[in-house]
Amino acid sequence: MHKYSLLLAILVWFCIWGALKWVNPPIPGSVMTLFMSIATVSILVFIMADENRYNSFLAPILKLLTEDQLFVPRVFLLTLFPLFMGWVTYERIRPRFDPPYEGRTIHPEAPSTFRFQGKSFDVLNTTNPLRDPAELTNFKDNLREGKSIYFLNCAFCHGDLLDGNGHFSAAFNPLPANFRDIGTISQLEETYVFWRTATGGPGLPMGATPWNSSMPVWQDFLSEKEIWQVVLYIYDASGSTPRTWE
Amino acid sequence: MMRYAPVFMAMIFGLLPPASNAAHEELKEMGYDLVPVEPKTWSKEDIKAGEALSLKYCEQCHGLTGDGNGTMADRVFPRPRDLTWGIYKIRHTPSGEVPSDEDLFDIIARGMPGTSMPAWKPFLKDAEIWQLVGYVTSLAEYFEEYPPDEVFVITAKTESTPERIARGAAVYKETDCRKCHGDGGRGNGPSARELEDDWENKILATNLTQAWLFRGGNRVEDIFRTMATGMDGTPMPSFADSLKADDLWDLAHYIKSLGRERALDVVIRAVKVNVLPEDPYSDLWEQASGSDFALAGQIIVEPRWFMPSNNNITVKALFDGDEVGILFIWDDKFEDTGEDGSPPDAVAVQFPSKPTEGNVKPYFLRGDRIRPVDYWQWNNRDKKATAALYRGLNEVSQKILDIHSYGGYKNGQYRVVLRRSLTTSDDTDVQFLTGVFIPVAFHLWDGSNGEEGLKMAVSAWYYLLLTPEPLMSLWIWSVLMVLLTACIEVWGIGRLKQAKMKKTI
């Protein structure tokens, strides 16, 4: 058994490496390096613990490095290794040019009030008036109006399926919001969505920078009621429910 | 024209001669066949369920009655299909016939690239799509009166070879495809301006180089099918009778070879050259790698523009010791010089006029008060480019120094190079330093589509990078590492050999 120490050591090392690579989700690179260092040290300690094993581990290496008959493979190995080290060095210090990371706050905190068509709009204490019990008789009409507004204005980017995949969406970065994603409007109150719709990209607070949102300022185009109607529609049509404080 | 007469007649009467058995064998050898189909029958409930689905998902474009006059219809190009006529472009049935049920299913499931018709497949279940098919067939009498009895099936696909492509190019010429699709396939032929569909709506010939927009798919068998069955309702005829199948395959392979997929990117990587070329068709420009950027209509502020001609711009960049050159490539079916009453075609590019801090960019439409943009605009009337400082959409101050420009319109495509020195002394000018990601955005106008001012195609912010040349030190360190490792090796082996000698003595 001792005869194959080197071979076994290499085999065990690769088995461990393969097993760790196979794990899903993938292990981060730095953790991988740590694990493999421990594995290497452990294998070496195990080999050194027994003198016979240690000698038979070293024997093939020494043979390759000193025996006259193995001149060709030796030269091959000895040329390849420095070139490999040179390549590693090159890769490590080569300057990389990746575009700046465009981190952003997806749902920045809403202000308590904002200017809406010349008057102050109270974000904290307003709810969608179209959900008032008195308005519920007009619910269907409001939805129909909302749908019409959506398709005259929003569907170009947010799409027929409300999935952010309209025929203009590829041109914008960040991509238009997908209303069917549980991370978008289902996480938000209707008043928040009203604020984002009314003030658009330019209305994002400083804390949310870098903002590159191409969302138009809809209070320049739509009345208060129309924005509430379209908000009602996107919740209804995407099967989402607005977040509430209760 | 006479040689198409039978095809046109067949289109008009919706009758292609039924293929006899012998003819079937012949067709099969040529790679396709007509096989009988049995149209599906739909229960009243299916059709009702389909109508309900249509009112939920389709009515915004195709209208409450399927007449193609929905809410969105006036704001999309091409217009939504009028479903009451039973005329469809993408079919496996002979020209002039209604599509098969499977054709309708496929279109709903897959969508139509280059139009506002999305793919419904992952969202709607197959059963729901079939109900929609049932509803659609109930909208036009033709489906009941003249149900399709045969569909076109490809039995053997041919492989693309340089010979086939070369023969296909000859067929393209002989068949006069260029009349609409143009010599280079960019949809800019001499008749391209006057095209109308059966509803007398203006339509355009397909740009065969932009394969991502092929309505019926861009695989070679899709192209073959489109040419064999034609695009009903449009001036695109069926060539099933006028061309032999082999010629049709050659043509399909040629058209496939014209088309390219687009490579959307977020960075234009400029590389350094000895001297910037002036000619936009020079080899240096050909070899430079280009990035595609998607464009959308400017629908952010009035006047909003819902139907821009251009959905794509390709940008390349090079620099030498003094100047940077940016090459803009975009397809345009009709050249507008601004002389025939329509505005001139134009392109513009913007950069933040000051280096960005913490990745905060100016507003993407011509900047804002705090962060203005350096704006270069070229138009095909003056054939020169001006520079301006914008602090918002309409707040502009022109700069005195122009930007050098080269190139123009050729064969359905613009190639315009804008050139400026890498650095200037004006602190409102963008400064091009190597290794810095400079934000960049594009605007495009197609005059014959009525585009001018804010009626334009726009992009979001992307980046331009002047890639620095590799540093000498990078090579020095790598070579040093090789030498160092080699030395250690030689020394180590020497030691080992010495030890071995001692042992043997």
Image (spheres, coloured by chain):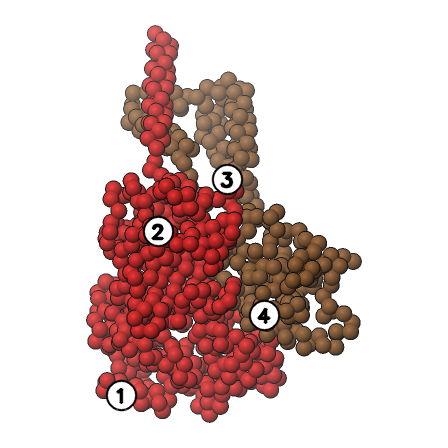
Q: Secondary structure at mark 3?
A: helix
From the image, state whether disc 4 or disc 3 is nearer to you. Answer: 4
Output the letter for the chain in red.
B
**Chain name for mark 2:** B
For chain A, what colour was chosen? brown
Q: Residue at x 48, y 82 (%)?
A: B82
- Neighbor class of circle 4 (other Cα within 10 Å; few <14, some 14-19, many 20+) is many
Q: Are marks 2 and 3 in contact (CB under 8 Å)?
A: no
Q: Label 4 amino acid? A: Tyr
Residue A217 left/right relative to B474:
right
Instruction: Compare marks 4 and 3 and give the one earlier in the sequence.
Output: 3
Q: Is residue B465 above or below residue A119?
A: above
Q: Secondary structure at mark 2?
A: loop
Numbered-mark total: 4
Label 1 sits on residue: B5
From the image, state whether disc 4 or disc 1 is nearer to you. Answer: 4
In this view of the protein, can residue A71 be seen by the observer? yes
Q: Label 1 amino acid? A: Ala
Label 2 sits on residue: B400
Label 4 sits on residue: A150
Relative image position of residue A121 (x, y in whole percent)? 70, 60
- Neighbor class of circle 1 (other Cα within 10 Å; few <14, some 14-19, many 20+) is few
For this rendering, which residue is in front, A136 or B497?
A136
In the rendered image, the residue lying farthest to the top is B505
Q: Secondary structure at mark 1?
A: helix
